[in-house]
Image (spheres, rainbow, N blue to C red):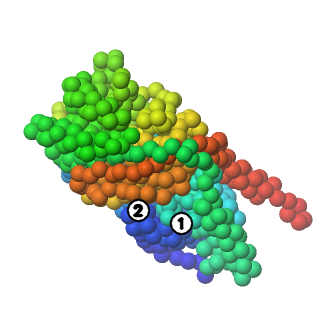
Amino acid sequence: MEFPYKYRLLISFFAGLFLPLAYAPFNLFWLAPLSYACLFFSWNRLKPSRSFICGFIFGCTSFFSGIHWVYVSIHDFGQLHPVIAALLTLLLVMVLACYTGLTGCVAVRWFPSEGPKAWLVSFPAIWVLFEWLRGWFLSGFGWLSAGYSQTDSWLMGFAPIGGVYLMSWIVLLSAGSIVCILIGSSRLRIRVLFFMAILWGIGFTLNKYSWGYGNGRALTVSLIQGAIPQDIKWQPEQFIPTLELYKSLTEESKDSHLILWPEAAIPALYHTVEGFLEEVNAIALENGSTVALGILRDDPSGETIQNTLAILDEETRFYVKRHLVPYGEVFPVPGFIRNWLRLMNLPYTDLASGEPDQPPMQIAGEMAAITICYEDLFGAEQLHYFPKASLIVNVSNDAWFGDTIAPHQHLQISRVRSAEVGRYTLRATNTGISAVIDPLGKVVSRSPQFEPHVLKAVVQGYTGSTPYVLWGNYFSTLAAFMVLLIQFLVTKFTIRPGT
C-alpha cells in the first residue's frame, strides 16, 4: 500500500522542525540522521514535483527553527520595521529551503527513487553537492550543514579528512541506512548494519588521531570579552567607559603573550583612537605581550571603511576582512534601493573587502590564520594559510543575535574549522561565546555569556597538514559527483535480458 502523500508532508514538516535540536546548544547529534531518514522516506517513489514540495517544507521548518535569530539582528538591532524584518527572515528561509527542495526533485527525476540505490547512493550524494553549492553560491550561507551537528559524535574524526561535507555525507548515509533498516529486506538490514558499524568505527578511531605536531612552545593567551550590549555600544556616552573597560582588562592580562580583543571592540575608527591604542600597546610591550584587536578603519582609498584585525607592535599591522556579510557589510542591490535604505536611515554603504589570499600574520611568535566573524563559515577559503599557519585567530561579534541559539551554533562551526586543519583556535567575541578550541575540535575553555570576562589559557602552535588541508572540498564533492555519474550511467545503459 502506497503511503499517502499528505502524511509524507506531515513527516517532512516535523522532521525539519526538530532537526535544529541536533545542533548546539541542544547537541542531540543522533537526531540528525533520524530527521534526514524521515525526509528520505517521504521522497520514496514520489514524483519530482512532490519531492520538491516535501523537501521545501522540510527546509522551511528546519531553517526557520534553526536560524530564526536572523530576525533579532534585523529588527532588534537593525531597527527595521517588524513586518519588513519578518518578511526578510522568511525570504531567506524560503531561499535556503529551495536547496532542499531541489535536492529531492533532482534525486527522483534522474536517479532511482526507491531502494538502497536511492537511500544509500543518490540521495546522500546529491544532498552533499547541493549543500556544498549552498555554501558558496551568491556569497554562500553554510549554516546548518548536516556535518556541523556531529561535533560531539565520532563522526568529528572525518573532519580532517574531507571537512564538513564529508561529515555531512556520512550523516546522510546513516539516514539512508535507517530507512533500509526500517523498510528494507532482512538481508539488506544485516548488510547495512555491518556497513554502518564499520563507518562509525572508522570515525571513532579517527576521532582520537591528531594529524599535526605541537611545536612545544607554550603560548599564554588572554581573550578579552567586553560584553558591551549591541544596542548601547555605539552611543556617545558609552565610548569612554568602553575604552576604560578594555584597558583595565588588558592590564589584568599583562602576564600573557597574546591579548586578543573581539571584532570591532572599540566603537570608533582606528585613526580616532590611535593615541589610546598607543598607550595600550606601551603597556603590552613593557610586559612582552602583543595586543590584537578588531577595529574599523578608513579604507586607504578614502572612499569607505574596512573591518580589520589590528596587531599592535612596533608598527601596527592589519588584516582586512575579505568575505563580507551580504546586506550587513555589503549591499548587492540597485541604486534606487540604496536610496530607499538611506531615506529609512538604514545602512547602505559597502565596506571594502581585503585581498582574498592574505598571508598568515605573525602574532606573539606564532603564524596565525586570521578570520573575522562570518568568515569562519568558509573552511576552504582559509586553506591558503596552511600548513604555514600554526594556529587560528578568530574575532567575532555575536551580540547582533542577542540571547539566541546563534552564538552556540557559531562556536560549533569554529570547532569544525579547528578539526579540519588540526590547529588551536583562539576565539574572542564581544558578548560570548569566547573560547579556546583544541586541534581535535574540542572546547578547552569558554567564557560565560553577557558578562565582562578574561579567558586565559595556554596553547601551542601546530605544524603539519591534514588531508583536508591538501585537497579541501575537492575530495567530498568530486567523490559525490563521480558516484552519481556512475550510478546515472549504469542505470541508463543497463542491458536488460531480452533486449
Q: Residue at x 66, y 52 (%)?
A: 480
Mark 2 Cα-neighbour bin, 10 Å: few <14, some 14–19, many ≥20: many
> On the image, numbered disc 1 is attached to which residue?
153
Q: Earlier in the sequence, mark 2 or mark 1?
A: 2
Query: In which quadrant of the rendered image does the N terminus lie?
Result: bottom right
Q: Residue at x 62, y 58 (%)?
A: 209
Q: Residue at x 53, y 37 (%)?
A: 389
Label drawn at residue 24: 2
One can see residue 368 in this view: yes
Query: In which quadrant of the rendered image does the C terminus lie?
Result: bottom right
Closer to us: 199 or 239: 239
Q: Residue at x 43, y 39 (%)?
A: 371
Helix, strand or loop for disc 2:
loop
Rendered view: 31 above or below 149: below
Mark 1 Cα-neighbour bin, 10 Å: few <14, some 14–19, many ≥20: some
Residue 55 lies, in percent from the top left, at 50, 61
Residue 203 lies, in percent from the top left, at 63, 63
As measured in the structure, the alpha-carbon distance from the residue carrying label 2 to the one carrying label 1 is: 12 Å
